[in-house]
Amino acid sequence: MSIIKIHNLHKAYDQDEVLKGINLEIKQGEILSIIGSSGSGKSTLLRCINYLEIPTSGEILFHNENFFTSPKNIQILRSRVGMVFQSFNLFENKNVIDNLILAPLKILKKNKEDLRKKALETLDMVGMKDFAMKMPKTLSGGQKQRVAIARALMMNPEVILFDEPTSALDPEMVGEVLDTIKSLAKTGITMIIVTHEMSFAKELSHRVIFMNEGIVYEEGSPNEIFQSPKLPRTKEFLKRFIN
């Protein structure tokens, strides 16, 4: 069953058309990786899915419902479609546990003490329980990203969007974040991951799409894309990764 359906999606900034008619369906429980060169539209597509960017035209359906009808509806959508950013986006003036409980406290109106208990359980899932009272400035990049993943989980999302979750990290910190995402994949949650980590995409994904100049240029299973891509631009992009 498809959880997200995207029909003829376009996004332009003035005269610069970044997305040029995206058609895509994401199944419930699917792990979809989006690869492509910088400027191909990957992050813009992700940000359109939960309306951090407003599409120029086209349609995005979540459970066959178009949520772009009012600000209130968009807030409901974002509570069900979480996002993890490349630059963490933690509140630097709040400690780790307060970063986690802020959104469900304000949006879902949950009990604060219940949320603190859940936050500790969620931090434990990502190996960050011992850092619950720490301020973000004291954490490494990898630790901040694991906190950001835990924060997304606090809203009980059905889908999590990852926008290049390791691109801001030092190389030695990449592994801990990728391992956290791999563990999360075992829960069956739907994930859409924009990434430059090709071996990770190959290992984890059910499906991979290669974006080029604002379109879905080629898509297929990890083996199809990484072992035997069919189209010239995909082959060129992946030539150093193809065995």
Image (cartoon, grey):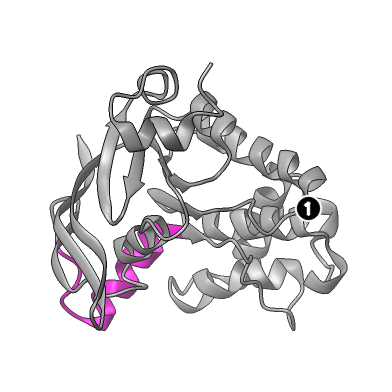
Q: Residue at x 65, y 39 (%)?
A: 178
Q: Residue at x 76, y 44 (%)?
A: 127
> Which quadrant of the rendered structure holds the N terminus?
top left
| Residue located 54% across and 53% down the image | 164
Q: Which residue is mark 1?
A: 170
Q: Is residue 22 above or below residue 184?
A: below
Q: For the magenta stretch, what is the residue range? A: 66-82
- The stretch drawn in magenta includes residue 77: yes
Q: Is residue 198 magenta?
A: no
Q: Residue at x 24, y 74 (%)?
A: 12
Q: Is residue 187 left or right of residue 59?
A: right
Check disc 1 and report its element: helix, strand or loop.
loop
Amino acid type of the residue that numbered disc 1 sits on in the rendered structure:
Asp
**Pick the front one: 158 or 92:** 92
Q: Position of residue 45 (x, y in %)?
A: 33, 59
Q: Is residue 116 visible?
A: yes
Corner quadrant of residue 230 = top left
